[in-house]
Every structure is written in structure tokens, then in C-alpha cells.
Image (spheres, rainbow, N blue to C red):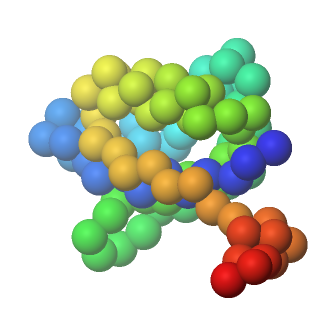
Amino acid sequence: MPTYVMLLTWTDQGVRTAKDTVKRADAFKKQAEKMGVKVRETLWTMGQYDAVSVFDAPDDPAASRLAIWIGSQGNVKTLTMRCYAAAEMSKIVEGI
């Protein structure tokens, strides 16, 4: 299953309700499971982004659905990136 990294930035609403952020992460994980996505971990960060989530999804559409769902909750804006393990990257660069 492909791996993705989602960078999250709190919206004004998300900051106002920051005390609920762990509960929201739990809800995110449960919703992901309903969509066939496995959240490996969510970590809160300092700097440009407020959190990062690493998850495995069956395909890009499933990852996109999860990103749209979390954005629709109004607490975060996201940037989602597809990741490649070393074995996958080796296959990608074959023939260069």
C-alpha cells in the first residue's frame, strides 16, 4: 500500500479549539479506517506546520478522499505528499 505524509496547519477555528486536537486526531484515525486507510502516526510539530500524519492508503483517490474529509471539518488545511521507500525509489530510477 502506498505511504503518504500529510502536513497540517490549523485554521483559526482549529486554533480556537486546540484543546480538542488529540480527540480530533482520534476521529481522523477512525474515519481513515472507514475509508480503508491506515494511519501510522500523527505528530504535533513546531514551525510552519502544526502537525504531520503518516498513513498508508490503497491508492491516490483514497488518500485524496481522506484529505478532503479532514479539510471539510474546518480545523486544518493540508498538504499531502506520496512517499516512496528505498526499494520503490530504486525501481523508479532504474534506467536513468
Choose between 48 and 14: the one closer to the eye. 48
The residue under the point 32% across, 21% down is: 72
Q: Can you say which quadrant of the picture contains the C terminus?
A: bottom right
Compared with 15, 50 (above or below) is: below
For residue 23, side relative to residue 8 (left or right): right
Q: Residue furthest right?
A: 87
Residue pictured at 34% horizontal, 30% vertical:
71
> In front here: 52 or 16?
52
Decide if residue 42 is in sight here. Answer: no
Image location (x, y in percent) of residue 91: 81, 70
Q: Position of residue 93 (x, y in %)?
A: 71, 77
Q: Could you tell me if residue 56 is visible in this image?
A: yes
- Image quadrant where residue 31 sits: top right
Residue 30 sits in quarter: top right
> Which residue is more in the foreground, 13 or 78?
78
- Please, is residue 56 above or below residue 35 in the view? below
Q: Quadrant of the N terminus?
A: top right
Which residue does the image show at 18% across and 34% down from the upper left? Answer: 13
Picture quadrant of residue 11: top left
Q: Is residue 22 above or below residue 48?
A: above
> Residue 21, position in %: x, y?
42, 42
